[in-house]
Amino acid sequence: MVTFLAEYGLFVAKALTVVVAALVVFGTIFASSVRGRKEPGGQIKVRQLNEQLEEVQRTIKEAVLPKEQIKEAQKAEKKQKKQQHKADKKALKKSAKDDKPSEESKKRVYVLDFDGDVKASAVESLRKEITAVLSMARPVDEVVLRLESPGGMVHSYGLASSQLERIKNKGIPLTICVDKVAASGGYMMACIADQIVAAPFAILGSIGVIAQLPNFHRLLKKNDIDFEMFTAGEYKRTVTTMGENTDKGREKFKEELEDTHVLFKEFVGSQRSKVDIDKVATGEHWYGTRAKELDLVDELKTSDEYLVDACDDADVYEVEYKQKPSMADRFGLGIEDVSERLMLKAYRLFEGKFF
């Protein structure tokens, strides 16, 4: 009986392995067949943070305050909303009569998020969010970007910074909040803001440039492997990971790094004229409190505190561009989920029985 169970268990395990392998192969073929097709679009999602905050406050009041005070608070809230509705309606009528955009209605604050990686991949969503916001934003409004990034590629963060410049060029006030880190390319983005708000222990600065690469030339030479590279142009390739680097190539590469650093310094200096650029452009980073002393930030406060305060005087909207997953992505996730479940069931079925 034990032998039969062992053989049966082995047969089932093999069958599950074959099924999983077939699913993976089929999924790979399917993904390859749809690769290159137009990816599905995304959509802009908007949430009003005032409503979320009011809901939280309402829940706390109902748990803490007596019923009489709750009723009084609800009446006061309804009265305030009614007055604001009348003011907005009046401003809208005046706008229609003058045939001009109204500046008298309540201020709006548009909140965006940027979570940066080495390639600044989030710029693809950021550019769409900014386009959407600029279609509605007025000079009396404000854009708040919650930024988190340790930096990355120069050209990628250059593009991300250019996207933020679009807000400034339209005359819309821009505030950037840093709760954790905005260093190097991240600070390149942050310095564009009209004001930078940072948490006391957020990391800022690191105005410098770095490049590093391994070189396998001696390893290849030791194993009698030749590496050949052909270029046209004296400095088409200065240093390489496989070939033998020369002093001339290293000097040129260092020269290019220095020039990039100069451009970085000039950019930060043009955006924040009160900063002593020679003092801060050493590649060092500082925590929020020290960064404020160096004028790298304007105010010490978390983004939560800043936005809660903004809800008192403005309508605050969180704007996010959501990319729809492609069919290949959805199918791939489905195969991964099925595979994990099959393997888990196989483990549970035979766990402790004959192994």
Image: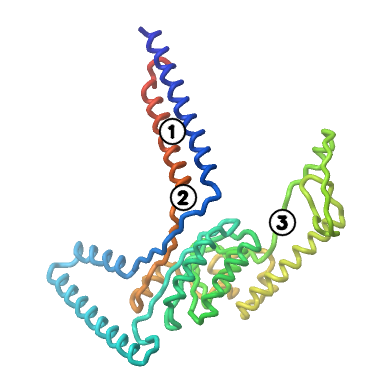
Q: Earlier in the sequence, mark 2 or mark 1?
A: 2
Quadrant, the C terminus: top left
Q: Identify the residue shown where x is 54% and y is 75%.
A: 166
> In front: 333, or 37?
37
Residue at which label 1 appears: 339
Which is closer to the viewer, label 3 or label 2?
2
> In front: 76, or 23?
23
Q: Earlier in the sequence, mark 3 or mark 2?
A: 3
> In front: 31, or 353?
31
The answer to whether one can see residue 200 in this image is: no
Local crowd size for mark 2, using a 10 Å CA cut-off: few (<14), some (14–19), many (≥20): some
Task: Tell whether 324 sits left or right of 234.
Answer: left
| Relative image position of residue 149 (x, y in whole percent) | 55, 60
Q: Identify the residue shown where x is 44% and y is 37%.
A: 335
Q: How many marks?
A: 3
Q: Give SS at disc 3.
A: loop
| Relative image position of residue 285 (x, y in whole percent) | 62, 64
Q: The residue under label 1 is which amino acid type?
A: Ser
Task: Tell whether 232 sits left or right of 4.
Answer: right
**Corner quadrant of residue 52:** bottom left
Q: The residue under label 3 is which amino acid type?
A: Ala
Q: Which residue reaches farthest left?
A: 68
Relative vertical location of residue 4 with respect to residue 41 in this rendering, above or below: above
| Relative image position of residue 157 (x, y in whole percent) | 61, 64
Q: Which residue reaches farthest bottom?
A: 98
Residue at which label 2 appears: 326
Residue at which label 3 appears: 211
Question: What's the image's color scheme?
Answer: rainbow
Q: Give SS at disc 2.
A: loop
